[in-house]
Image (tube, rainbow, N blue to C red):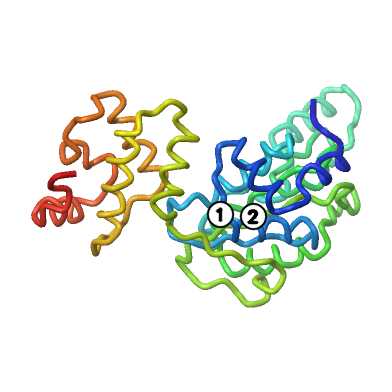
Amino acid sequence: MKRSEEENASAMKTREDIATALAASGYIADAELATAISLMQLLKRPLLLEGEAGVGKTEVAKALAAAHATELIRLQCYEGLDQSAALYEWNYQRQLLAIRAAEAGAGARELFGREFLLRRPLLEALEAGGPVVLLIDEIDRADDEFEAFLLEFLADFAVTIPELGTVSAAHKPVVVLTSNRTRELHDALKRRCLYHWIDYPARDREAAIVRARLPGVPELVVGRVCAAVARLRREELYKAPGVGETIVWARALLALGPEDDLDATLGVALKVREDLDRVREKGVLQGA
């Protein structure tokens, strides 16, 4: 059963409460991130998370939804994303069928009623029956025009549907935006949000993350994988391994054996041929 908005608010008052709740959902947050989330909730402002791909930005929103025992609504951004794909569309196929039915004598129907409305993530977040976590993922991939629209949406948490009127959020969603910095976001959007940069975790915290995601994992596996990933991240690579790759690498060793050759499974962590060649030529994992 989902908790009430008041229960959700009281359950995560302090940074310590937040870190504990996120850890229970499998996300190990450092003090700075816990502080950012605490301020997001106290000030009721969106939180913009930036960082390299794979550092766990999206997982923050997932863990927040789990910690609040509420729904996660995700809008995945991409080039060409427009308002209709993010807010709502009309089901033209059903409208056409209704027109044909009316022509056949079935009686006229209102073609722009709720039954013909296809709700997309932003409208779903506005009309949710309770508080939800709205994840706007990889906003840097969207166009400038959509970013400008989003700025207006975040200011009012309302949208006008010409045929139906204005829809306002009965429960203001918790909003998390993520960016991989493939382009710079506009200052206006950044001013609307609180900001936090997520870096690759320190070795001890990454080990704690692996233990949380893989309960019972042998310490030999945790130590070998986290040490190997730390070595790889010190190299000049096209794409350094993220936390997700660390977890999968640990799973690979669990499947093959804790002492299996790390070099043989290097493709779990690195996904660019030049990176594989560089690491093997330099013997980066030698003795790992």
Residue drawn 23% across and 41% down?
267
Rendered view: 287 above or below 279: above
In the image, what residue type sits under mark 2? Ala
Label 1 SS: loop
Residue drawn 79% across and 65% down?
155
Please tell me the numbered disc located at residue 48.
none
Rendered view: 267 above or below 203: above
Residue 103 horizontal side relative to residue 191, left or right:
right
Could you give the CA–CA distance between mark 2 and mark 1, rounded to whole angstroms?
A: 6 Å
Residue 132 in the image: state x and y as whole percent. Answer: 76, 43
Residue 130 visible in rendering: yes
Label 2 SS: helix
Residue furthest to the left in view is 281
Residue 12 horizontal side relative to residue 6, left or right:
left
Disc 2 vs disc 1: Cβ atoms closer than 8 Å?
yes
**Circle 2: is it few (<14), some (14-19), or many (20+) Cα within 10 Å?**
many
Residue 133 in the image: state x and y as whole percent. Answer: 71, 45
Residue 111 visible in rendering: no
Which quadrant would residue 160 be assigned to in this image?
bottom right
In depth, the one of 5 and 204 nearer the eye is: 204
